[in-house]
Amino acid sequence: MSEPIVLGIESTCDETAAAVVQGKNLLSNVVASSMNEHARYGGVIPEIASRAHTESFIPVVSQALEDAHLELSDIDAIAVSAGPGLAGCLAVGVSGAKALAWSANKPIYGINHVIGHVAVTQLQFGDVPENTLALIVSGGHTSILRVGNIATDVQVIGTTLDDAAGECFDKVARLLGFPYPGGPHIDRHAQLGDPHALQVPQGLTQGKAAAEHPYDFSFSGVKTAVARWIESEVAQGNEINVDDVCAALADSVANVLSRKTIAAAKSFDAGTVIVGGGFSANSQLREALALAGERSGIDVRIPELKLCTDNGAMVAMLGSNLVSAGVKPSSPDFSIDSSMD
Ligand code: KG4
Ligand code: ZN
């Protein structure tokens, strides 16, 4: 059989996206984002994102098929993100994908978006080796996965107990007066500051909490700690050096992410670490992981940015893996799962 052609559809958050792959070849990749509509609210507003998905769904899917020079009838299977994500947003993508599958009589796969972030790296680096570790970080997730086999054996071994790393950056950025999303601003300012100017707490890294949660994260205390530090500096009449705040934050978060990921890789004997999600654009994280990888002889794979942020190719790629592995499609009435892990 020739390699399966899979249409992937993504609508977990603020990107409506569709892509077509054939085996591991990307034939098209279309993304429409409602990010600018959320900027003035300082974060993603679920109702605005859901409405944007309903408006963009048909144009984006049609464009993905057209760019691939295909009709819906040429597709072998449809894959769609079934979770985790915002319930209203997932409902739009999944209902649309089910309607397409039903009308064209095609099998449909409801996939896990976070595993899609791992699968998409095959477009740049080739096969995901067996027993790989993955760190997926964005405004919505911070997870460490052990990937025995990308289609059939993936376990979450660590996650954030509260905020995602990107969310934590966005909250501190707001405090510092940067527009949403603030992560890239913090990254830029961090390059100019002194990371030792203040101490940013690293959750779950000491004592009993560290032992009980070796691969979990907690970032919810960071914003409060930074806010308190700023207040006390202001009370003492000191000027706030924004670059220093950013440098301390970025250094601390990159350090804990990279340290726990490499520790997990070592303990699971994984020779490869894959990184994905919008936060993997972060310079401090990339540097920390590249260095840690070099030191420990682990192959660290961080794909180009357009593959890191949410897109349809990640969904189509995982769908393609499932079809090739002979995994049964989802039942036609499968549900969305906004907190899927
Ligand atoms: O994957 P993504 O585009 O959207 C979702 O959250 O699903 O990730 C966006 C997140 C935001 O929190 C943004 O501030 C953060 O990633 N981000 C960064 C950088 N670029 C994006 N955080 C730190 N440094 C960056 N260079
Ligand atoms: Zn994502």
Image (tube, helix red, strand yellow):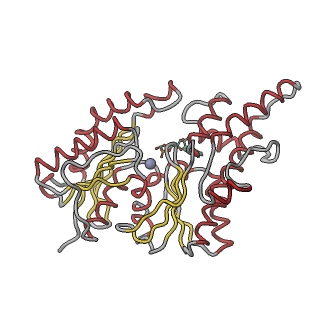
Quarter of the figure with residue 4: bottom left
Q: Position of residue 165 (x, y in %)?
A: 58, 46
| Left or right of residue 151, residue 106 in this image | left
Residue at 65% x, 40% y is 186
Residue appearing at x 20%, y 58% in the figure? 77
x, y (%) of residue 31? 35, 44
Measured as percent of width and height from the top left, residue 164 is found at 55, 44
Q: Position of residue 96 (x, y in %)?
A: 22, 42
Eyeballing the image, is 292 above or below 56?
below
Q: Nearer the viewer, residue 261 or 291?
A: 261
Count of numbered marks = 0
| Left or right of residue 233, residue 101 in this image | left
- Residue at (67%, 65%) from the top-left corner? 291
- Eyeballing the image, is 299 above or below 30? below
Can you say which quadrant of the picture contains the N terminus?
Answer: bottom left
Residue nearest the viewer, comparing 184 with 139: 139
In the picture, residue 178 is in which quadrant? Answer: top right
